[in-house]
């Protein structure tokens, strides 16, 4: 049975939409990651800040808030706590005194390594009974879905035709 047929059978028998299943899988993966990550004493939000900042060092607070899809005021509170813990530092912007640029400290790097290891354990546990072919197919399907949604989100909703559920 192909992966697509397998997913179709599961969705039809459980009467759940693919959106619901994807949301639930993502929620459960976060929950499992958090169970493992409690030992480090960081919240999920702080983990997300570390992750995004590790790929975008030197970004300003508003830019990081946009990447995280949270309000700037929410991010400021997170950054304050993380700075107190010695995980991030704010450096002055070279041309705009009103703005700070964000960087990870050396203390953050072991936590990032731990986060990557815990993420790998969680992904392995999630996919433990998948064959390599099933894993690759699922990855391909999800990438295609993401690309379709990126393209769709770039179009105005008014231009879309109504969906016929019959």
Image (spheres, helix red, strand yellow):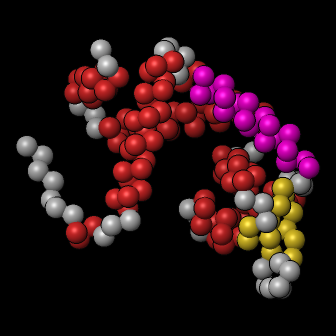
Nearest the camera: 102 or 134? 134
Q: Quadrant of residue 116?
A: top right
Query: Going 57% across and 37% down the picture, which residue do you hit?
Result: 30
**Where 77 sits versus 87, above or below?**
below
Query: Going 75% across and 45% down the picture, which residue do you hit?
Result: 42
Q: Is residue 10 left or right of residue 91?
A: left
Q: Quadrant of residue 120?
A: top right
Q: Is residue 140 magenta?
A: no
Per the picture, the main secondary structure of the magenta-coloured stretch is helix
Nearest the camera: 63 or 140? 140
| Quadrant of the rendering where the C terminus is positioned | top left
Q: Is residue 119 magenta?
A: yes
| Quadrant of the rendering where the N terminus is positioned | top left
Asked whether residue 125 is in view, the answer is yes
Boundaries of the magenta span: 106-124
Q: Is residue 33 left or right of residue 60?
A: left
Residue farthest to the left, as pictured = 166
- Image x and y of residue 26, in percent: 49, 38
Q: Is residue 49 left or right of residue 17?
A: right
**Where 125 sits versus 25, above or below?**
above
**Where 20 sits versus 150, above or below?**
above
Query: Going 51% across and 18% down the picture, which residue do you hit?
Result: 132
- Image x and y of residue 68, in percent: 60, 59
Q: Quadrant of residue 15?
A: top left
């Amino acid at each position: 049975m192909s992966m697509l047929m397998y997913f179709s059978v599961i969705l039809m028998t459980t009467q759940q939409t693919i959106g619901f299943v994807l949301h639930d899988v993502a929620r459960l993966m976060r929950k499992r990651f958090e169970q493992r990550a409690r030992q480090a004493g960081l919240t999920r939000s702080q983990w997300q800040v570390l992750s995004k900042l590790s790929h975008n060092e030197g970004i300003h607070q508003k830019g990081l808030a946009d990447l995280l899809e949270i309000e700037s005021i929410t991010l400021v509170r997170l950054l304050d706590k993380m700075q107190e813990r010695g995980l991030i530092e704010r450096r002055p912007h070279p041309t705009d005194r009103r703005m700070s640029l964000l960087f990870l400290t050396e203390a953050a790097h072991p936590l990032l390594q731990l986060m990557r290891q815990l993420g790998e354990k969680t992904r392995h546990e999630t996919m433990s009974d998948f064959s390599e072919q099933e894993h690759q197919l699922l990855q391909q399907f999800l990438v295609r879905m993401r690309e379709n949604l990126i393209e769709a989100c770039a179009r105005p909703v008014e231009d879309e035709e109504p969906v016929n559920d019959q």
